[in-house]
Amino acid sequence: MGQMRRVIPFTRLGRGDLGRVGGKNASLGELTVGLASAGVTVPPGFATTADAFRELLDRHGLRPRIAEQLDRYREGAALEDVGAAIRSLIMAEPLPEALRNEITAAYEALGRELGRPVPEVAVRSSATAEDLPEASFAGQQETFLNVRGAERLLEAVHRCLASLYTDRAIDYRERMGFDHLGVALSVGVQAMVRSDLAGAGVIFTLDPETGFREVVVISAAWGLGETVVSGQTDPDEYTVFKPSLKDPALNPVIDVRIGAKRRKAVYAEGGLTGTVDTTAEERGRRVLTDAEARQLAEWAVAVEEHYGCPMDLEWAKDGTSGELAVVQARPETVQSRRRSTTLRRCLLTGMPGEPLAEGIAVGEAIGAGPVCRLDTPVELDRFPMGAVLVTAITDPDWEPIMKRAAAIVTDHGGRTSHAAIVSRELGVPAVVGTGNATGVLRHGGHVTVSCTEGSRGRVYAGLVPYQETETDLAALPATRTRVMLNLADPSAAFRWWRLPADGVGLARLEFIVAHQVKVHPMALVHPERLDAADRRAVDQLTEGHLDRTGYFTDRLAYGIARIAASRWPDPVVVRTSDFKTNEYAKLLGGRPFEPVEANPMIGWRGASRYYSEGYREGFALECRALRRVRDEMGLTNVIVMIPFCRSLAEADKVLDVMAAEGLRRGENGLKVYVMAEIPANVLLAQDFAERFDGFSIGSNDLTQLTLGVDRDSEALADVFDENDPAVTSLIRMLVPRAHAVGRPVGLCGQRPSDDPAFAAFLVGVEIDSISVVPDSFADVKQHVAAAEGSRYGGDRMVPSGIRPAHAEPPSAA
């Protein structure tokens, strides 16, 4: 046989060699050769060939003996017995002498290249049918890290070859219809990156939960990457916005979430690896800087463009040199296969009560059934079909059980853990990284697992009713009136990217403050005014931030950026905070800064706060977050909107404060809108239009203040009506007045969702946009189209007069 048929260096491999060295090693060759010009660093190495594996199987009748064992499995023999028997057969057959010699020679050559006679290497399996766009064999065969010395390397290679017949691999090939004996195995041998002294993780070139393609998502933990992939640790997560990567002056990192990172994999004494606890300092510290996250994202995008499809990569950082490297790349196999024109929605229809456990939501579905709590994989007949699997952590040995589960809940793991990856592929909802599921979920008790409430997955007691719907987005009609979204939760924003909305008409800062920041901004500016208990709580919440106000601007900017990125380049109208004083007081540290008001609904709220001594410094933090999103991250589609602005003098004061904080109308394309929710905004519309670039009708407050009705009063609920002639008259008055001076008008409220006639009324007054919650979007779009059909007939898509666009789309960064 030819000398190089059994072992080939990565530098002589490429995508076309999948049949010779499997998907993983062919991809490493492609990265090494094809991405060098893009600056992508790939550790050197070599691969054994599929021919070498076949040579082993053809010795001493090994192939027919394997076939006999597979026949036993199909006839009912236990999977674990058949798998163990086949692996024993392979391990009992010595590696051919020629293969041993070529591996040893290639290892010695690698040592000379690295300048180390006995280098540490990673030894990974690469099946000749793996890492295809239509299937993923990832994690089914063995991997060995920190292998040193030729003899240990030969042993690791032999064990990798035998691992083609792990129980999970046999099960997967049976399920996917692959011919067992038609699949061969290559072994990749790659120089180790000393990430045991730094960190490692996984990269997706799209959002792995929703398929949103404008971001790169990076998971990162301390130590070797196996803890991230296996789910033994809860990693950091960095979200990078692809369009902003194109401009070196921008910071494209639009979200950072610090994981617990309680465990890390390191080199073990005497070889291979072990897992140890991280320090408190490591748990609170970021693994990657923004610059490092950017570098990895740029490489990932280059790989994606080279392959022409979304990618799933593994990366590592060398703790001795500080250099980053890509150590694996494969096509992403779940979201890339989903139809982008179909929106599948699950929605709880019953009242679930408080969750028993919470963690990271995987998938966008709901599952329910009896809890089956397990510590280790068991025989399939001991796991009831349709049960909810609850365990500390999963690995590939769990996969036969996982495919029988209605839902999966784990104590540990992040969005790139084994449990998350397999759950997505199986279409099974999962909640990972709960921390306590195995302790709080009772074996045999019925639960409902919901992954439809944003990034947090929740486990509820009992069988909570829910419904599933599918919407064909391609069938939704086009409309002249822009139908936009009301979004509040940044963690859920990417879920709606498939909706053909015209942007976001209302993004509420107070939701981000209440749920992600959780602390009153003035408590960060003036901690000396807090009592001891609140001071300790604030210190704990903001740990890791030398400047406590930086915590506020970080969390707020990341929340705004996620919403803005989800609709780029369409306009995203962000309303500055509109808490009432009683709501502000409930925030951590809020009571010393908020007066007690008899009627907070018409008290110190909205614009009146922004220039006052009692909140001016807090509003400055909001402005800094908005400026960071627009000017530093490049999300110039953000429009700022001021709520509850009572007078022209108040408008001038607010705009002056914003300008002092670097937010000036017109600079970098900044537009500032005002809420039209006070009759004064309508009566003086043209004067307000001199100060603002657009109006958004807040129908609840406009109705409240027009009719003199407390909108929260149960006794007056029958009087509160947005369709009252007094309210609709004000809307009829506002729209033409605004249009006369070139200002658009939108409405954000629930009424168009509940009342098709009200939507038709808005179309009739030629409103520019209607903004609704995502669940109502499809219905409202159809109501608007029907109303436009009645009003405009065949010309309903042609704007009349000089009606302005809601916002000019910004140019791509």
Image (cartoon, rainbow, N blue to C red):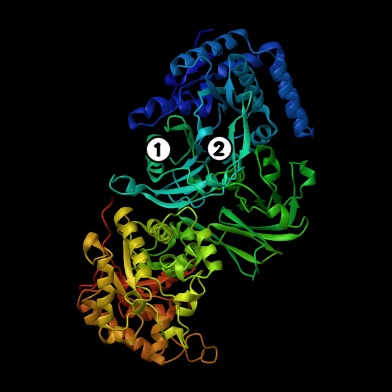
Label 1 to label 2: alpha-carbon separation? 17 Å
The relative height of residue 152 versus residue 486 in the rendered view (above or below) is above
Q: How many marks?
A: 2
The residue located at (47%, 69%) in the rendering is 776
The residue located at (25%, 82%) in the rendering is 648
The relative height of residue 98 versus residue 35 in the rendered view (above or below) is above
**Residue 409 shown left or right of residue 516 in the figure:** right
- Is the C-beta separation of discs 1 and 2 under 8 Å? no
Q: Nearer the viewer, residue 245 or 307?
A: 245
The answer to whether residue 67 shows anywhere in this view is no
Q: Residues within 10 Å of mark 2 (few under 14, many from 20)?
A: some
Dot 1 amino acid type? Gly
The answer to whether residue 611 shows anywhere in this view is yes
Residue 139: image quadrant is top right
Q: Quadrant of the N terminus?
A: top right
Horizontal and vertical percent for residue 685? 25, 82
Callout 2 secondary element: loop
Q: Nearer the viewer, residue 813 or 482?
A: 813
Q: Residues within 10 Å of mark 1 (few under 14, many from 20)?
A: few
The relative height of residue 463 versus residue 709 in the rendered view (above or below) is above
Q: Nearer the viewer, residue 306 or 271?
A: 271
* Residue located beneath label 1 in the image: 308
Horizontal and vertical percent for residue 11? 42, 20
Horizontal and vertical percent for residue 724? 41, 90
The residue located at (35%, 31%) in the rendering is 39
Dot 2 amino acid type? Ala
**Residue 747 shown left or right of residue 587 in the figure:** left
